[in-house]
Amino acid sequence: MNILSAFVVGLVFGFGLILSGMTDPSKVLGFLDIAGVWDPSLGLVMGGAILVSSVAFFFASKRTRAVLGEEMRIPTATQIDRRLVLGGLAFGAGWGLAGYCPGPAVASLFTGMVEPVIFVSAMLAGMGIYELHSRMTAGSARQ
Amino acid sequence: MTIDWANFTPWASLAGGMLIGLAAAMFILLNGRIAGISGIVGGLLRPAKGDVLWRVAFIAGLVLAPLLYQSAFTLPAVEVDASVAVLIAAGLLVGVGTRYGSGCTSGHGVCGLGRRSPRSLVATLAFMASGFLTVFIVRHLIS
């Protein structure tokens, strides 16, 4: 059931990305270009999404188990550190360069365009670099 | 500031955003998980027993969304201006940045702000500021 639910959630998420305009990098860049001719649409995407999700998180915070039986995995980290900020800055720079963030890029993989395939391949490589780096530093910390 | 009224899509973006929020709401309440795309995808590079299938199912839903959407409606027009080199650089930055900073637009933006996490607020401010700045540099200073 958890697997089926994850599939349906992915599907709904994808529909939302398409309907909202997030899968069009030129629209995303139109939002990020506040000094140019500005398209505020994506502010409404964020607002609408947070409005709905905040109701769910209110109820989720009162539960220890999810409806389908798994334990609630709400992040517990509270530390505001260098990696959080630097990671955010790096992500924002990449987002501003191409107009793709992870969700829309992955959702566009099989639409017949080559750009999302190139972007997602590079993104996976970046995630792999992070993974290798964190394993190496974890390894040296143990010695 | 000039508003791009021609491309402004308030209702579609609000509705799409609410669908994204609904997906995030379903995922936390049904599966007890955060619908953060970079985390879901990146976790596949650190495979653990019982932790792979739900990620694959979610991504399958996300990837199938445009194909299903297409069978009922017309997909919105998509325009990518980035060159191959820029797509690769952007993908690498997004890959490393989202993993290093523990989230992207969905995990920190939609879910993190939805549960009022100060950590996610800082991350969101960082990637938004960086996105605005990057587009400003690319569109108004370089070209």
Image: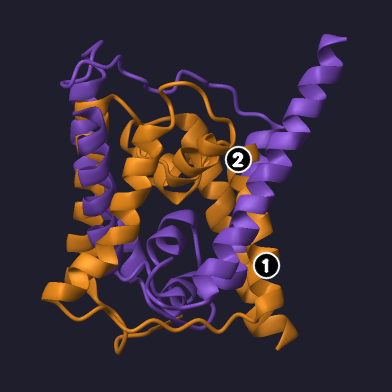
Chain colours: A purple, B orange
- When asked about the image quadrant of residue A142, the answer is top right
Residue A104, given in percent of the width and then of the height, sits at: 41, 62
Residue A101, given in percent of the width and then of the height, sits at: 49, 59
Count residues near mark 2 (Cα–Cα under 10 Å), then give few for <14, some for 14-19, many for 20+.
many
- When asked about the image quadrant of residue A138, the answer is top right
Give the structural element (helix, strand or loop) at label 2: helix
Report the amino acid beneath label 2: Arg
**Residue at far left of view:** B72
Badges 2 and 1: C-beta atoms under 8 Å apart?
no
Q: Which mark is residue B88?
A: 1
Nearer-the-camera pick, A112 or A143: A112
Q: Earlier in the sequence, mark 2 or mark 1?
A: 1
Callouts 2 and 1 in the same chain:
yes
Residue A107, given in percent of the width and then of the height, sits at: 38, 61
Q: Which mark is residue A88?
A: none
Residue A116 seen from this side? yes
Q: Which mark is residue B99?
A: 2
Q: Residue at x 43, y 32 (%)?
A: B52
Q: Residue at x 17, y 61 (%)?
A: B15
Report the amino acid beneath label 1: Ile
